[in-house]
Each structure stands twice: as C-alpha cells, then as structure tokens.
Image: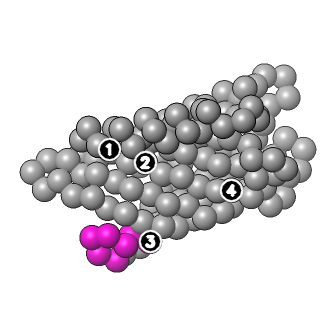
Amino acid sequence: MKKILTVIVAMFAIVALASAQPRALGIRVGWGGEVSYQHNLGGENFLEVDAGWGVNAISVGAAYDFQIAPVGPFGFYAGPAAHMWLGGGEDANLVLGVGAQAGLEYVFDAIPLQISLDWKPIFTLVPGTGFGWQSFGLGIRYMF
C-alpha cells in the first residue's frame, strides 16, 4: 500500500514541477471517484493524471490527450491512456491496462471552471487480458 501511495504522490509531484503552463485540478466521478489534474503541454495537447478510489481498490492513471475539435468554450479530445489498479481485501492484486480516453469539455468564460464528460475504455494486460468499457465519468476542475 505504501508503494502505491508513493507512486501516486510521485506522479503528482512530477506534474506539479513541470514548467508553468495552464492547468486544472478537480475531481472526476463515475465508477468510483478520482482526483484529476490536467497540464497543458503546448498547443492543444494536455496530460491528465488521475488518482482514484473505488470499491476495495485504488488506482492511478494517465492520458495524453489531443484537442480534436475546439469550438468556442467546447472541446472534444481523445488520446492514449495507461492505468494501474490495486485491489484490496484478502485477494490483493495488481491490474495493469492500456486504453484510451475520449471526452467533451466545456470551459466557462466568466469563471476558471471546466466541466467534462469522458469515456475511458481499457484493455487489461496483467494479470490477464480483458476489456472494460464501463468507465464513464463527469469531471469538474478549477483552472489556474
């Protein structure tokens, strides 16, 4: 458990130490909850790092997203993602997966707030292969 928490803290620290660019911090709720951080990488690309919790599990994930169709305050984005879960209980197990993230976001003009709806389909690789399509979520982030 300490190792997983160390990895989560390290990922957030690396992102926080990156050069000063527009960024957003908030929550994403869906199948469980996540603390979500986005960091603009220049142009229309951004990195999203999430640390989450669910029923008997904690997770950490990252996605490299591309803005596909920005239209005013709306933006459609998609990109590759990687995820790691650690299940609790008596059968503690590690699950690793790769997948994608696709979503639609709205950025308010008057206040530094972003709302997003997204989908994160995942192909699990460890301990066995499988596909998870259920990860839909609503994100609310403060932009700074």
The residues tagged by marks 1 and 4 sit, at their Cα atoms, a distance apart of 24 Å
In the foreground, 93 or 74: 93
Above or below, 57 relative to 26: below
Regarding residue 90, the answer to whether it shows in the image is yes
Element class at badge 4: strand
Q: Image quarter for residue 40?
A: top right
- The answer to whether 119 appears left or right of 111 in the picture is left
Q: CA distance from mark 1 to mark 3?
A: 21 Å
| CA separation in Å, label 2 and label 4 | 16 Å
Asked if marks 1 and 2 touch (Cβ < 8 Å), the reply is yes
Tell me the distance, in whole angstroms, between the alpha carbons under discs 2 and 3: 15 Å
Residue identifier under label 4: 65
Mark sitting earlier along the chain (4/3): 4
Q: Residue 19, percent across and down?
A: 72, 35
Vertical side of 4 occupied by 22: above or below? above
Question: Tag 2, which secondary structure?
Answer: strand
CB atoms of marks 1 and 3 within 8 Å: no
- In the image, 11 versus 58, the foreground residue is 11
Q: Amino acid at mark 2?
A: Val
Name the disc covering residue 60, or none. 2
Of the residues shown, which amino acid type is indicated by label 1?
Answer: Ile
Label 3 secondary element: strand
The magenta-colored residue range is 123-129
Q: Which amino acid type is marked by label 4?
A: Asp
Residue beneath the point at 54% across and 52% down: 62
Name, please, the residue furthest toward the left.
90
User: Which residue is at a point 27% across and 70% down the rendered structure image?
Assistant: 127
**Is residue 33 in view?**
no
Q: Is residue 133 magenta?
A: no
